[in-house]
Amino acid sequence: MLVFHYFCIILHILFSKMHIHFAPLQGYTDDVYRRIHNELVGGVHCYYTPFMRIEGGGVRAKDLRDIRPEWNQGVNVVPQIIANSRKEFDRLCDIIIENGYKRIDINMGCPFPLQTRHGRGCGLLQHPDIVAEIMQRVTELTEQGIQFSVKLRLGLESEEECFSILPLLNSTPLTHVILHPRIASQQYKGEVHLDAFRRFANECQHPLIYNGDLTTLEDLHRIETEFPHLCGMMIGRGLLARPSLAREYAEGKEWTLEQRIHLITRMHARLHEHYASIIPSETQLLSKLRTFWDFMEPTFGHKTIKKIQKAGNLKNYLAAIP
């Protein structure tokens, strides 16, 4: 029986699909987008909210709205927070827990200077003492039934920064760790550092998720082949550019261009319908809808996307959509 048990484990590793996690992107993956994506295509294990943060002494109203349970029904949502101190961390956790959530993701990976220069996101990696304080609170809250994960990059300035806090992560009860193998100055450009990711994977004692440059089925298959013991892959821009990608991976086959375009036009129609009902100004509505196409040039081509983005009114905008 023991031999059969291990045989089943090996089969699961070799043939089961990894979970796909939808990365959060400010201004794109709000509650409306998440609900529509989940309903029309799915294939995603869970959706992470754009990070909630302290700004001007409080939390922004739109961040509070984004996590309201009534706007996230039927969607497997994980709220994400970004903090530079135990005090900020506590305030944000309290708000999320008050809204009924039992899972929280901690952002230690945001590369943008607006956050890192204040010690948030990647900037937190240079402060192991603060990370230790936060991890202590994570341990306390875990004992109260709250689950935590951490999303991070290799570092702010050096690949070594993540390894300085890895012992702290390893000693904390986390559900998983998500690593984007770049440093902050790279933003989302340049090569990912797979050797550093491999070293991190070997030393990390938690289930690990890969994040970075996953835009095609070939990309997903390459990562699952190279790192078969990962518990999942996180996709952000790749899913905004190709909303069917997670579903294609789950089905094990590539959708035709016609199928992909059909899904995209359905999603846009639903987004248009919703935003038109709450945004009275045509100018504001047009500005909101345009962002839907920001990553879709690979599917529609430069000429089409440029025509959509240059449309001066809603009539011309809708006429420009394929």
Image (spheres, grey):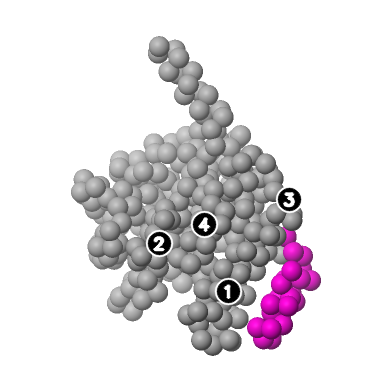
Q: CA distance from mark 4 to mark 1?
A: 16 Å
Which region shows up in magenta? 298-322
First in sequence, mark 4 or 2: give its number: 4
Residue 236 pos. (x, y %): 55, 57
Residue at image mark 3: 256
Nearer-the-camera pick, 33 or 235: 33
First in sequence, mark 1 or 2: give its number: 2
Numbered label attached to residue 72: 2
Residue at image mark 4: 39
Residue at image mark 1: 272
Q: Quadrant of the N terminus?
A: top left
Q: CA distance from mark 4 to mark 2?
A: 12 Å
Q: CA distance from mark 1 to mark 2?
A: 19 Å
First in sequence, mark 3 or 1: give its number: 3
Nearer-the-camera pick, 234 or 181: 234
The residue sitting at the right extreme is 303
Q: Is residue 277 visible?
A: yes
Residue 42 pos. (x, y %): 53, 52
Numbered label attached to residue 35: none
Q: Toward which corner of the image does residue 272 lie, by quadrant?
A: bottom right
Q: How many tags in the picture?
A: 4
Which residue sits at x=60%, y=60%?
Answer: 240
Left or right for 298, reference 199: right
First in sequence, mark 2 or 3: give its number: 2
